[in-house]
């Protein structure tokens, strides 16, 4: 199209301890185009944007805006220079009205002290009219639906005369009608010469709205193509296409009889609806789906840390109430949570304390006293069994790498002698070598006759480790596939069924 | 690396390898991180040079006695701090239990006795009263714990409320039987002897019985913190409540129990305080929680939660007491002591954060 | 310890900055730099020393006397660890002075030869009704 390049990022790299999040990534956004940024979860899209807005400090690389090199320290600085972002989670002052939110931090003033309400209202209304937004400027932010709040966010970006606007999953909470309106606004902005970066999972949207597409995978740039040249299948192939050889240990487990039956689980405070499935002894059952499709909620509902409205859980034909974590542990369940740092580890406590916390009963002597010796033995057993790399049992878990932390937590759960292991993203934030060890561990557990449920957003992982895969979509079970003869495309299609 | 000598040698070799800038940083870090110890050292040296009496056996005995008196409350409140909370009701609760204990254990022939028909003070009766006041403290703690755990209210708010409520009860109690808010005195000899009676003398100063009790209490609390499931759960909840919940720890009961145990400690502290001050007034125990909180924070029971040790608490109480004994000997006014206490708490919190931020 | 690289601090997996650790607990929302903390610490220490220094220009404790209806007795200023200077006895119409007491109920008498001054405090006068002949 021969338009000017507005924003240019090149050679961007960023390393977190143990993980290379971005590796020499490039991105070029031309003025007056919509540029889609695509990739699986964890491909590095958000990290790249955070580097642009100064929320992360990039390790290397350069960013140019209009040919000038820039290095923003904060999103405020970016905004002042004409780079705005419409967030997935809206950062707004919910108790204030629309005008306040738009002009926050730069109120027009009279005589330098008094806020010029009149000018503020006029300016706001002018912008709203321009964008075709019908919102009362005096409404309190918290009282408005998300879609309108998003409009206000866009108006704010426009009010800064932004040259580049980033939309991060803007349609995730909008109705179809609202999406149409959003696209109108995006088109209008494009016609005015704004460069738009559009991040989304939704293929159909991307095809409709974007002019160019950049695809990322595993923190690396994969391709940048005009949207017209790419078919949906090409995009999927580029997003997920990685070599599968030797990433996974050989599958040796043999599924046996049905052990776990989940019937009609509906969530009290979440989107789960009538989730029903069965899992066998010695089987690894994968649960796939997009973010917020209810994968984690399913596991957490089974484990009883989320309230169920209806639904029954049977283990070996016996009903388990599983009203709280303590009861579930007694019934032979174990849950490895998704957010290791938030709900998994006790950062300030030692490996030993982290290992024994769920199985303190095993160490009780005389009904009250906890035997130090048996605690040490158990901890050492699992350090050896999992080949956890740690200087000592007394080391604080915080100072271990992600993979080793995960091993400690798996050890914690194995000490409770569970029948059913619920693993939520067991390899998140873990480097490739350690991933292999975790896979091996999961297969070993299935070999011992345990039932393993595994949630993952990395599809190759599910295909490589699981026997069967349940695909969830919009809080419902969208379908079930045999991991041996299915494809990522089939799963992707199912995952989009109820979106 | 547990060997302190080895550790010291390591530090020395590390230091030699540093360049000038790092060396400067090393000293600044060292001075700031140990600011309170240095402050204590300054006070000790200055006081010792001006008041020779400071470095005597008697003065040391006085210090031990004070530590034994302030320790129970600190041991109790430390549990709340481990849970990332705090307890502002501690002082008032000990004031209330001190008053109850004093009234129940007045001399039988004392003229201004509040209740005439109280049994003769015997060892058995004293123990009954002790259990009673500990129970009163525990009940207040239970209320604190319940509201903190069930409503997820911040402990500041909950304990501030119970502090006020307890104070109201104290005032009401002092108005009973036409007492009209007069301090309660005339404690029976048996009570005084059992708590404050002389164990042995150090220098010229008697070491009272409650020093022994404090030692027993420390042993019990050490056991509870380190060797019981309750203790482990407490640290787990303080370290990461969400993870504790997932791990099957009953967060609700742990929180309630920690507060209840703390309340029981305040109850005991009040029982001791009655004898220590000779008479109990409505203001007894006022702001005592500030001393306890300051001692805990100085002793490394961090507001970050999930960290702390019994030995740290003892050290904290010692440091705080040494500073105050020194200042009292110098003749610093008690109103100034409040300012100093406040500054010490702020300083200890800043140090606490600093250690957390620059930890390698 | 052979694999040192594997034992690294996991600080910013989903954190915000490079070296910045996240506070937890009571400090959850605190955002503060080490430099600011240093300033606070130094300020606190200076305040403490200043208060002590100011106070030491006029050290000692004040002992006030509550004569409980008798003639007023002037307060005294004494240093730590000293004995009380015996004040002149107050007088009261129709009563006889029985001594100075620590508590207002006049139960615990101040021993002028043994008790030493450790703090600010008030002594209360004890009175006994004279036999009105």
Image (cartoon, rainbow, N blue to C red):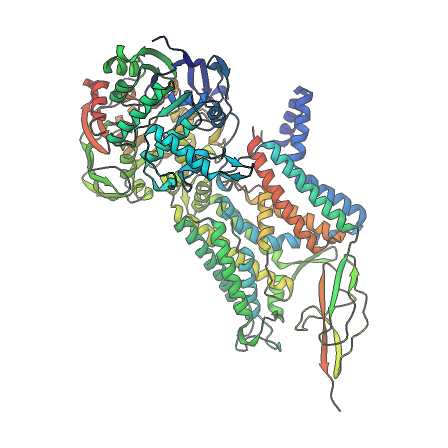
Tell me if residue A383 can be seen: no
Question: Residue B145 location, x and y as percent?
Answer: 44, 52
State the image quarter where residue B351 is shown.
Answer: top right
Report the residue at 27% width, 38% height from top: A302
Q: A465 or A356, which lies in front?
A: A465
Report the residue at 68% width, 58% height from top: B200
Quadrant where the C terminus of chain A sits is top left
Q: Tag count in the figure?
A: 0
Report the residue at 22% width, 30% height from top: A281
Tell me if residue B295 can be seen: yes
Above or below — where is A493 with respect to A422?
A: above
Determine whether, in the image, residue A419 is placed left or right of residue A382.
left
Quadrant where the N terminus of chain A sits is top left
Above or below — where is B298 with respect to A454?
A: below
User: Furthest-top residue in view?
Assistant: A2
Determine whether, in the image, residue C72 is placed left or right of residue A426.
right
Question: Residue A88 location, x and y as percent?
Answer: 36, 29
Above or below — where is B227 with respect to B192?
A: above
Question: Residue A344 location, x and y as percent?
Answer: 39, 34
Q: A275 or B245, which lies in front?
A: A275
Question: Residue A401 location, x and y as percent?
Answer: 45, 25
Above or below — where is A302 with respect to A222?
A: below
State the image quarter where residue A112 is shown.
Answer: top right
């Amino acid at each position: 199209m021969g338009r000017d390049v507005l924003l240019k990022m090149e050679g961007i790299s960023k390393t977190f301890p143990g993980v290379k999040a971005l590796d020499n990534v490039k991105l070029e956004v031309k003025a007056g185009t919509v540029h889609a940024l695509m990739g699986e979860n964890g491909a590095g899209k958000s990290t790249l944007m955070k580097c642009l807005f100064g929320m992360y400090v990039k390790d290397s690389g350069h960013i140019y805006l209009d040919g000038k090199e820039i290095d923003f320290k904060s999103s405020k600085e970016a905004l002042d220079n004409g780079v705005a972002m419409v967030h997935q989670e809206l950062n707004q002052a919910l108790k204030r009205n629309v005008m306040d939110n738009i002009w926050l931090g730069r109120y027009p003033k009279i005589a330098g002290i008094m806020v010029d309400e009149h000018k503020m209202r006029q300016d706001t209304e002018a912008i709203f009219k321009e964008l075709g937004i019908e919102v009362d400027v005096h409404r309190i932010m918290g009282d408005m639906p998300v879609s309108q709040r998003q409009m206000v966010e866009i108006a704010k970006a426009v009010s800064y005369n932004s040259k580049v606007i980033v939309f991060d999953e803007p349609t995730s909470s909008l109705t179809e009608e609202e999406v149409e309106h959003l696209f109108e606004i995006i088109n209008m902005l494009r016609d005015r010469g704004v460069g738009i970066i559009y991040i989304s999972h939704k293929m159909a949207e991307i095809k409709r709205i974007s002019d160019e597409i950049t695809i990322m995978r595993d923190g690396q740039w994969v391709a940048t193509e005009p949207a017209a040249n790419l078919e949906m299948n090409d995009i999927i192939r580029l997003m997920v296409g990685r070599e599968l050889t030797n990433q996974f240990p050989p599958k040796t487990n043999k599924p046996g009889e049905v052990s776990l039956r989940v019937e009609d689980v509906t969530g009290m405070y979440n989107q789960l609806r009538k989730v029903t499935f069965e899992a066998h002894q010695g089987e690894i059952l994968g649960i796939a789906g997009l973010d917020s499709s209810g994968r984690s909620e399913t596991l957490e509902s089974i484990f009883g840390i989320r309230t169920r409205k209806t639904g029954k859980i049977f283990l070996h034909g016996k009903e388990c109430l599983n009203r709280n974590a303590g009861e579930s542990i007694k019934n032979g369940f174990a849950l490895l949570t998704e957010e290791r740092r938030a709900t998994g580890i006790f950062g300030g406590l030692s490996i030993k304390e982290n290992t024994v916390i769920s199985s303190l009963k095993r160490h009780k002597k005389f009904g009250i006293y906890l035997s130090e010796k048996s605690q040490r033995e158990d901890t050492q057993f699992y350090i050896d069994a999992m080949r956890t790399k740690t200087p000592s049992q007394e080391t604080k878990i915080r100072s271990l790498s992600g993979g080793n932390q995960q091993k400690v937590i798996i050890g914690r759960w194995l000490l409770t002698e569970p029948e059913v292991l619920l693993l939520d993203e067991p390899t998140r934030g873990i480097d490739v070598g350690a991933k292999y060890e975790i896979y091996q561990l999961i297969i070993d557990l299935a070999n011992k006759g345990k039932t393993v449920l595994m949630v993952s957003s990395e599809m190759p992982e599910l295909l490589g480790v699981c026997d069967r895969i349940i695909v969830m979509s919009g809080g419902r079970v969208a379908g079930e596939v045999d991991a041996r003869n299915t494809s990522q495309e089939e799963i992707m299609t199912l995952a989009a069924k109820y979106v | 690396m547990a060997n302190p000598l080895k550790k010291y040698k390591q530090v020395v070799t590390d230091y030699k390898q540093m360049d000038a800038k790092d060396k400067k940083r090393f000293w600044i870090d060292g001075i700031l991180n140990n600011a309170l110890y240095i402050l204590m050292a300054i006070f000790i040296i200055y006081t010792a040079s001006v008041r020779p009496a400071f470095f005597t056996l008697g003065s040391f005995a006085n210090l031990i006695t004070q530590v034994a008196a302030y320790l129970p409350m600190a041991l109790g409140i430390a549990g709340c701090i481990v849970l990332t909370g705090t307890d502002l009701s501690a002082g008032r609760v000990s004031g209330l239990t001190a008053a109850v204990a004093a009234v129940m254990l007045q001399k039988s022939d004392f003229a201004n006795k509040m209740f005439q028909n109280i049994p003769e003070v015997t060892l058995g009766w004293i123990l009954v009263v002790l259990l009673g006041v500990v129970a009163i403290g525990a009940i207040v703690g239970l209320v604190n714990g319940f509201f903190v755990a069930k409503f997820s209210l911040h402990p500041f708010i909950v304990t501030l409320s119970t502090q006020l409520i307890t104070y109201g009860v104290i005032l009401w109690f002092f108005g009973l039987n036409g007492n009209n808010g007069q301090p309660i005195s005339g404690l029976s000899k048996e009570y005084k002897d059992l708590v404050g009676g002389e164990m042995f003398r150090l220098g010229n100063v008697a070491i009272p019985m409650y020093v022994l009790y404090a030692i027993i209490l420390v042993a019990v609390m050490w056991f509870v913190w380190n060797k019981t499931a309750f203790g482990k759960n407490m640290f787990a909840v303080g370290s990461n409540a969400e993870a504790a919940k997932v791990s099957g720890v009953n967060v609700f009961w742990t929180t309630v129990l920690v507060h209840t145990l703390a309340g029981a400690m305040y109850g005991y502290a009040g029982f001791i305080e009655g004898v220590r001050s000779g008479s109990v007034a409505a203001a007894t125990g006022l702001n005592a929680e500030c001393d306890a909180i300051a001692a805990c924070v100085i002793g490394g029971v961090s507001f970050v939660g999930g960290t702390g040790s019994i030995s740290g608490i003892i050290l904290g109480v010692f440091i705080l007491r040494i500073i105050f004994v020194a200042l009292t000997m110098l003749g610093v006014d008690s109103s100034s002591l409040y300012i100093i206490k406040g500054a010490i708490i702020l300083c200890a919190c800043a140090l606490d954060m600093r250690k957390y931020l620059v930890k390698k | 310890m052979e694999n040192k690289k594997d034992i690294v601090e996991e600080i910013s997996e989903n954190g915000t900055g490079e070296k910045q650790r996240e506070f937890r607990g009571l400090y959850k929302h605190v955002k503060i730099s080490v430099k600011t903390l240093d300033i606070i610490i130094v300020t606190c220490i200076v305040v403490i020393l200043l208060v002590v220094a100011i106070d030491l220009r006029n050290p000692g404790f004040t002992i006030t006397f509550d004569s409980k209806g008798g003639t007023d007795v002037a307060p005294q200023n004494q240093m730590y660890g000293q004995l009380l200077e015996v004040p002149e006895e107050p007088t009261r119409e129709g009563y006889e002075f029985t001594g100075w007491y620590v508590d207002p109920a006049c139960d615990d008498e101040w021993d002028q030869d043994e008790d030493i001054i450790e703090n600010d405090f008030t002594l209360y006068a004890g009175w006994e009704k004279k036999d009105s002949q």
